[in-house]
Amino acid sequence: MNKFSFVDCKTVDEALGQLNNGATVKAGGIDLLDLMKEGIVAPPKLVNIRNVDSLRGITVSKDGLHLGPLVTLSEIAAHPDIQRTYSGLSDAAGHAATPQVRNMATVGGNIMQRPRCWYFRSTDFDCRKKGTSDVCHALTGENQYHAVINNSTCAMVHPSSTAVPLLGMNATVELTSKRGKRTVAMSDFYVPPEKSLINETVVQPGELITGIFVPAPEPGTRSAYQKYGEKESFDWPIADAGIVLVMDGNRCRKAAVVMGVAAPTPIRSAAAEAVLTGKTIDEATARAAAKAAMQGATPLSQNGYKTQLFQTAIYRTVLLAAGQMQRDPSAIG
Amino acid sequence: MAPETMLQEAQDKSTTKGAQTVARPKGDGVKRDSQTPSTPSKPGPGMRSDSFVFGIPQNGLEHIEREVPVSEPPPLPQNSELTYVGKPTVRYDGPAKATGKGKYTADVHLPGMLYARMVDATIPHGRIVSIDTSAAEKLPGVRAVHVIEHVYGVSELRDPKLETPSRYPIVRYAGQPIAGIAATTQQIADDAAKLVKVQYDTMPFVVERNAARSPDAPVVFPGPADAAGSAGGGGGPKDVPQKGNVHGPQRRLKGDPEKGFADADAVVEAEYFTQVQTHSALETHGFVVDWKPEEVTVYASTQGTSSVRNEFADVFKLPKSKVRVITEYMGGGFGAKFGAGNEGVVAANLSRKANAPVRLMLDRRQEHIVSNRPDSHQKLKIGAKRDGTLTAIQLTSYGTAGVGTGAGTAGPATNLYKCDNLLTEEYDVFINAGPGAAFRAPGHPQGCFAFEQAIDELAVKLKMDPLVLRDKIDESPARRVERQVILERTNWRNRREAGADSGPIKRGMGIAQSVWYRFVNMNSSCEVRVSRDGSVELMSAVQDLGTGTKTILAQIVGEEFGIPPAQVVVRIGDTRYPIGPDSGGSITAGSITPAVRNAAYQARQQLFAAVAPALGTTADNLAMQGGRVVLKNDAGKSYTLKQVTAKLPTDEISARATRAPEYSKDRLTYGGVDYVELAVDTETGRVHIEKVFGAHDCGRPINPTGVISQINGGILQGISYALFEQRIMDPKAGYMLNANLENYKILGAREVPEIEIALVENYIAQSSTDAAGIGESAGIITLAAAIGNAFYNATGVRIRKIPMTPANVLAALGKAQPEVEA
């Protein structure tokens, strides 16, 4: 690991004042420490925001849910209002990584994680994503865990589990810089590799996430999140699904079907949502939606099985959200 | 070398070469009928005849006469009649480990100690043109740089002249060590390592087994090359042909397999694939070396203090008397930690150059590359008569141990069951990847995955219950009892037709059996001291690699002196003490415990002789009974140990003893039967292991808690091997992609099923303790096969490839495109 300076900040202004000359924000430090240990990033300065009290706290109001970016995943998972009203988010936070990691990892850091790809995360390889080569090794190499959708430029996947329900719940992210504040919809937050290989999110240098807001759900809303991988304890998802259903009795009025590790950024499937909307939710509808979500997938040489896994993830999570199935023992985390 | 030959040598070569010759098996020995008591004859000179408890309690114990040296202690009765031996005993050093007081190699901190970092090759194959260390040497804080001249633990060309001489070794795998740097801090050493400039002349490479077999594949070696095994085994045959990268076959023929297949009523034939598994011990390989002119002190994370001393003496041309090796606590090795290794040699050179102690621990990435269990592609064919009698077995296996050899898998096919006609051909395939090494039951998990599934398939074809078929073909009395235990204590009788469940989740059960061999290392000595204050200590160079060796040694001494094991002071893992065996091949318990008992017994006899006059009696009138010293002729008189030692005329007495040769030349095996219940989610490809029941034998269990703990560990490692672990190489770059514990997936807490273990006592009358090791036959061999058989029972589909990841399971079930087999 490189040598670096460490600045401990108590306020947002103090932190913003330190965000210069290649400084990197450190909250829980979970992903950052891995990246530094592997030599993927070598920031000269870490700006520690963990002690900025104004960035903590969970507030539930009739308008919605406000999360300070320093709220930990275990705090989200344990919060009774989130469990009741935003259960997909509670599922995602409560099944991420390990209990120890969830105690340290913050929601702001969780959505700001760098992508997963073993070529990107190894100093052995130059690649298109790093800007050090023209090649995407995953396209022709070992790609069993890589993207099956939007994967022609760079086949990395985004690992954030909380981003999946946040996208399905139309959350917004508040960004603050010395120039002021702006609000970005989760649907605009991530930048796909076709648009930019350098910017993974819209967050600009000198900007800090100062809040995440989830609007209050319409009456009849139910949500769920499940992820699937090779093992239950501490594994990265190979397929996952975040489902938000606005139900009118047994009929679905509106649906959000979100996949995390299908593409380089979390994405919604309009095709799957169209299958569910206006229908009575049962296993056949759920399976039809799952199938629709994988129409047009472009699996690589080794990850064709992920399309099967995504279909399972989606149909089972639709049924879980609709209250027609228990949490799946095959889901991980 | 066949195991029985090794056993013979182990008995014959008592001291000098024993540790090196008692190499671990490749498991290619012949079938042996192990438990026929031999007929007693009149004892020879220096010998006497004793009557030993013999057999398996479930079958009714017998007694057997054995001729033993007169210096041997009297035979031990069965465990139920003993006080400490055979009783569940808490781990001797458990509290020290749990509280962090135990000092592992990485915890050793000597005054003035330097920290080292290895510089590794960044290409998979090529010549080193130059190495420029000047920038590294100039970095403030750097104290020594050592460039490697010879790489240890890899294959060597039979004819070195086939390669142009060079000052540097040829790089044959990415991650091959090139140099080491010692500095005042780890950070400086790490930074300096990045400043070393290596210029390569790259050569074509291959990292896939199948591609490497092609006649036009790049060759890893320009001619035939062979690897020596370590003190822990591994290594392949040396007298075999080699074409390109294909080394072998080692061929073994018995009877007439062709005729056997012609005589068969049923034949099963299939191909099986297993992956490369890395050792992934919790503690990485490492050393602290303190090179002083008068003595080189080596703190080593090793399975063999003797093996480390031997290799240091060999490499540095030092008398063994000037090398001291210390292993107080050890964080796992699984077969990969014997000898000095490249890191030990580098640490020693750096210490010598810097004139200061040097600590060199590998990082996790290096640990993944330094050793592995070879993969396999096996073609297996078995023929049988209608009643189950095996008529022929034919196995061809190809496996890669990277730049090493030792990928043979024929152990189970050769040694599990009686079959008169057998042909096995084992090939090693060289690729540009880190060397294979001995790994918990070398060759056997791979071989068993194929062989025990094929036996199951045969049972299906013959419409026989898999347990009944094994009753027919398995001659081991212990496994017969174990199968009975499985039948009585599991759900086996409720086993259903294959693929009986209709939903996406399918449940099933299966079993598989293991075989391992009794090896003994005669380099097994111990000293026991008794002080006037009643304290007792034992000393041996033998190490405890985490298996609980300290505990069983304390139990044995405790039994002789009538004191609780926790009161015995155990000093082991230091070559200043009497020599101990290297721990590999389940050798430790069976080798060292007789030496410890003998020393304890002799110390006790000396004690009795020394105090008898003061107690107004003679030594032969004193005995140990119920934890007290009693007078045989006066039932009313008894003393505590302390009361007796208080009468010692000197402050201390001590006795030193060595292990006697095996009491009989019978060739023994151990084994086990493991039962698995699982659920297969056919839509996610997840395999959930729900229950494992293991029935195992290992001679006389000394500490049932420790034995069960090791079996639990073997079962978990076996599940991890079957479901998760695999080394993934990038074929274009030649690098390991998952050299970490994030993408190299190992079973975690949530993957642990309900486990139940039944120990079958098996008194073999071979030594003064009758102890045996359990490390190899403890589940690692069987689990992949048992899971495969249960998978078939659940789904009606045979899975012939591990690990059973969602990708491989969905492919086997026809729900995803299979990958092209590499």
Image (cartoon, coloured by chain):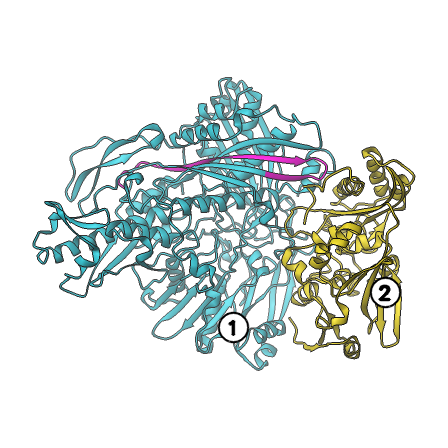
Chain colours: A yellow, B cyan
Which residue corresponds to mark 1? B115
Horizontal and vertical percent position of residue B222: 57, 53
Q: Which residue is drawn at 67% across and 50% down?
A: A333
Q: What secondary structure is the stretch in magenta mostly built from?
A: strand
Regarding mark 1 in the picture, which secondary structure is present there?
strand
Horizontal and vertical percent position of residue B101: 44, 65
Judging depth in this view, the residue of A327 and B740 nearest the camera is A327
Q: Is residue A309 above or below residue B129?
A: above
Horizontal and vertical percent position of residue B788: 59, 34
Judging depth in this view, the residue of B107 and B126 nearest the camera is B107
Say left or right for A149 vs B113.
right
Q: Report if residue A261 is visible in the image.
A: no
Q: Residue B311 carries which label?
A: none
Classify the position of the C terminus of chain B by image quarter.
top right
Tag 1: amino acid: Tyr
Classify the position of the N terminus of chain B by image quarter.
top left
Comparing marks 1 and 2, which lies closer to the viewer?
2
Which residue corresponds to mark 2? A202
Question: Is-magenta flag for residue B173?
Answer: no
Mark 1 chain? B
Is mark 1 in CB contact (under 8 Å) with mark 2? no
What is the span of residues highlighted in magenta in the rendered image? B663-689
Horizontal and vertical percent position of residue B254: 44, 29
Mark 2 chain? A
